[in-house]
Image (cartoon, rainbow, N blue to C red):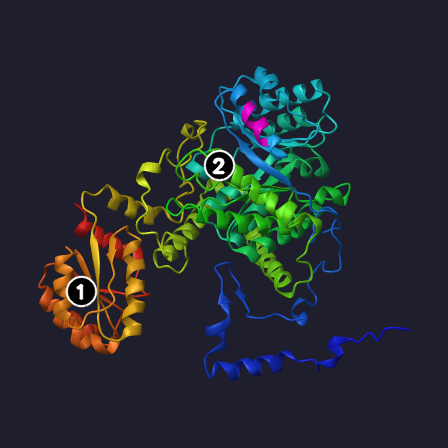
Amino acid sequence: MAKNKEKLFDMFPPISNEEWMAKINVDLKGADFQKKLVWRTNEGFNVQPFYRREDIKGLPALDTLPGEFPYLRGTRDNNDWLVRQATMGQTAEEMNAHARHNIERGVESIGIKLSKDFNLADFDKLFDGIDLKKIEVNITCCPRCAVKVAEALVAYVKKVGAADEFRGCIEYNPFKHLLKHGKDADKDIKAEALNLYNAVKEIKNLRCFIVDSAMLNNAGAYITQELGYALAWGAEWMNILTDAGLTPTEAACRIKFNMGISSNYFMELAKFRAGRMLWAEIVKAYNPDCNCACKMFVHAVTSRFNQTLYDAHVNLLRSMTESMSAALAGVNSIETLPFDMTYQYPDEFSERIARNQQFLLRDESHLNKVVDPAGGSYYIETLTASIAKVAWELFNAVEEKGGFYAELKNGAVQKSVNESGSKRHTDVARRKESLLGTNQFPNINEKALDKIKIEECTCGCGCGEEGACSVEGLRFDRAASQFEALRLATERSAHRPKVFMLTIGNLAMRLARAQFSGNFFGCAGYEIIDNIGFNTVKEGVDAAIEKGADVVVLCSSDDEYAQYAPEAFKELNGRALFVVAGAPACMDELKAQGIENFIHVRVNVLETLTGFNAKLLK
């Protein structure tokens, strides 16, 4: 007997977009839809609260499959990304031991940073016991050493019989010091690039021309900004290499993108999809021999910009969602940075956790079993198109001004990214951008001064000392750095300020404002003394003085501040700094009576706390 197959959706009438909007406007009760529900992003476009099938109608490449040009849905028919981890050590033997340790624990791709003093004859020691037919090798070195490193690596790979199977990259980045230091070394990039290509051309899967837009990410660039400049950087390589005599296919197949991943989960996922599509169109314009040359080869690394010193285990949450964005987007490899790298060289525990984050995504969540799971999602497809549009506009603007290298030399790229970084620091200072444990909900009793074992990471190769400093370099201050400096100053002080919550009046408001104020002053590492409430202002002030309070915060309702604030201010009589929690309608009248300090959601938290530090720290 045949089963009755009901089509469930036939039971519901179709609802038009206009009907949805009419219902939403009724529920908003006269509030402005655009102000209440539309997300005004920093990426150059707005995000709607809902999307429907008609929103993706006409978007490009939606009818393609993974592995098909223009590779919106992926460059291959699987999602088996490589798990990458950095190799630490001062000598070839130490790096070999560390690399083998990581490989034995599941790592498939290793990153190796060679100093300019590394003895290239030590490749035997460096790769001893490592199967170069199975393990991807990525080498970072001083740009001036790249050709010699390439020659030595190729000779070794051929010697061990791994030429056909070898996969890896020598990350040649002659633009690095212009980006970091505003200094342009005197070199012929075209000639050097050609020599490098000739050194590696016998090894098919050895890439060497790097687009390191992760640098922009770590300086605070927005997503569309990173992608737009990355595309321009890639096009610069295509121009340099084809001008040097390489075919478009030879050039494109040696370019690799190192891209950062921020915690903006869905947008980062969409960024990689948009990037593949746009890069395919760029390479196609050079008329390569085949579409396969148009594939974007991407390594993704979690962000340093949003990592924090305090409450450092929250870094695990950030890097987990970042790794997930990249994994679902179909990148070639991912490096999840250890959670403790802001204050020490990663140890065995933090490295193990970093590896396991990807193993959880791949082997337990099975994200490698589905290619482009976001394909067809109204929201993500629209995000992809929106990001592509803004990034493409930036790419064209850079091209019209002479290309990526020209914009680096005149400092336009660095200036633009630094402006974005400054804007994000301001947003963190005002808590428009949240860093859990740093500018929101801090662990007020945590100490970090004693755990700091290293300074912030620098290039380390010494090349930044060359050339004249003609433009500004990128600023790599993490988003949390200013709050951390504030809190470290408190730790170094001989006196830890005490903040006393004088809670009185309306129960709900005094509790809410005490919690807000505790989180506010906790961001500076002050001792917070909370209370359940006082019957009179005098009782609260007396208790504050008894506790040795440096700051007394009046927590009540707006209606009651007109009475309580002048009374508390007078009773305190300068024995501690007086603060009102909120921005009541009577604020001007209170200021006229000498009350100066008000904290609320619209103040600059960092600026306010810096002022308190100046008054309170000894």
Q: Is mark 2 on a helix, strand or loop?
A: helix
The residue under the point 48% across, 80% down is 28
Residue 596 numbered tag: 1
Q: Is residue 99 magenta?
A: yes
Residue 104 spot, x, y in % from top left: 61, 30
Q: Nearer the viewer, mark 2 or mark 1?
A: 2
Q: Is residue 459 above or below residue 605?
A: above
Q: Can residue 547 be seen in this view?
A: yes
Q: Is residue 489 magenta?
A: no
Within 10 Å of disc 1 (Cα), the crowding (few <14, some 14-19, many 20+) is some
Depth check: 536 or 117 in front?
Answer: 536
Which residue is tagged 2?
A: 349
Residue 217 spot, x, y in % from top left: 49, 46
Lower sequence index among marks 2 and 1:
2
To which quarter of the image does residue 18 belong?
A: bottom right
Q: Amino acid type of disc 1? A: Glu
Residue 48 spot, x, y in % from top left: 55, 69
To which quarter of the image does residue 195 belong?
A: top right
Magenta range is: 97-102
The residue under the point 50% across, 28% down is 88
Q: Amino acid type of disc 2? A: Phe
Q: Would you say 149 lies left or right of 161 here?
A: left
